[in-house]
Image (cartoon, rainbow, N blue to C red):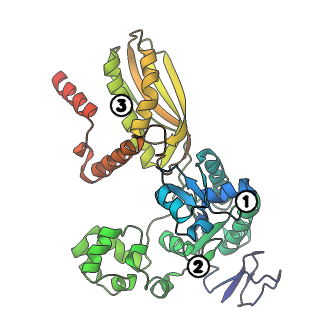
Amino acid sequence: MQTLCRDCSHVSAHRLRMCAACGSDRLLFHARLPDLSVAHIDCDAFYAAIEKRDNPELRNRPVIVGGGTRGVVSTCCYIARLDGVHSAMPMFKALKACPNAVVIRPDFRKYSAVSREIRAKLEALSPLVQMVSIDEGYIDLSGTARLHSHPPAALLATLARDVERDLGITISIGLSANRFLAKMASEMDKPRGFAVIAPEEVGDLLGPMPLTAIHGVGPAFAKRLATDGYRLINDIRRADRKTLIMRYGESGQHVWERAHGIDHRTVSPDHQRKSVSAERTFNTDISAHDVLEDRLWSVCEETASRAKKHGLAGYTVTLKLKRKDFRTLTRSVTLHDPTQLAQTLFRATRPLLQKETRSATPYRLIGIGISELCPAGEDQIDLIDPTVAKRAAAERAADRAREKFGHGAVQTGRGVRMEAQKLRRD
């Protein structure tokens, strides 16, 4: 049995009651500590933790980060969670459950800056870092023990202390042999936790959990599984793999693999982008404002699709126009909140286009780009425009329908009109 001291990163080959190096009793015990190398890093109540760090008066108070009375909770501190507040809860319900809470509007620029600092600390340990959201990511420390002269578990314990010291927030760590088990481990000991799951422990540790603990098993699929007698992870572990595949297709394969602790996904470094954009060159130069506006919508949709694919949002939106003499014109606007939505991009750049088309100048190209990127968070729905929430929800629903049934499954009125015009031209 190996012992890791979380206060000094000392590793011992024996199980100890206190650290032989520093005397701490903040210890982690596991036989597989030396050879497990895939970790999930999860920041504890990230937005709220940063707000408390920046305002010490909030330290012992319940804090909710989110919109106004029409908005939702982006995140909340652990004190607020004791009253039943949780992410995505409507604000009016959250304030009813925790009337003494301090409500703070999200500041994604500040949160993104901290996220980048955490990423830099991870990349100093290994090039195999994959951030999956603004406050969580994976790191593969395989082969780094010789480079750093410490096993992965010790490096992670040092990382947790460095984040706490340098950034003023805490993280929880899960260590295992693959991404799925690492994430399950990080959720077992929060906040400020460090847990380990070896593949051979899946039955004992995860078996009694409901199937909804597996990412990808939502309420509808869980209900279907329950109808067939599968409610716990152990139920799936006892089931025949071929039977599950025949009954549920790829979902059956997925749930069987996860129930057995199998995850073939690797930690893939996602190189940091500085912008996301799309542009269209016309077959013939266009000067008519209404036609250019239709083309503007097309590139807004394409840019939004690319941003969503990469899980990014941006604060600055740039309109690009190229004249018939190849001179390029760019106009930008900075938003209060980052976006990845086509509707928001279009509404932000439409006035810019109107201003540039007053002189009926012919253009040969139009493009849209977003920069000052950050990981996409919750749609900001508590804005001056009361219809923004409906538009955001409609666009997300359309995205899901297109993903399931194809791009042509859902079209806007503008898109239908453009398609009809194209058919007439052809």
Report the mark closest to the observer, 3 or 2: 3
x and y percentages locating residue 221 in the rendered image: 30, 70
Which residue is at a point 44% across and 71% down the rendered structure image? 263
Name the residue type under label 1.
Answer: Gly
Q: Which residue is mark 3?
A: 297
Q: Is residue 353 visible?
A: yes
Callout 1: SS: loop
Q: CA distance from mark 1 to mark 3?
A: 43 Å
Q: Secondary structure at mark 3?
A: helix
| Three-letter residue code for mark 2 | Val
Dot 3 crowding, Cα within 10 Å, few <14, some 14–19, many 20+: many
Q: Position of residue 55 (x, y in %)?
A: 73, 54
Q: Nearer the viewer, mark 1 or mark 2?
A: 1
Label 2 sits on residue: 196
Q: Earlier in the sequence, mark 1 or mark 3?
A: 1
Pick whichever, 426 or 293, lies toward us. Answer: 293
Up-down: is 380 above or below 151?
above
Query: Which residue sits at x=47%, y=60%?
Result: 93
Quarter of the C terminus within the rendering: top left
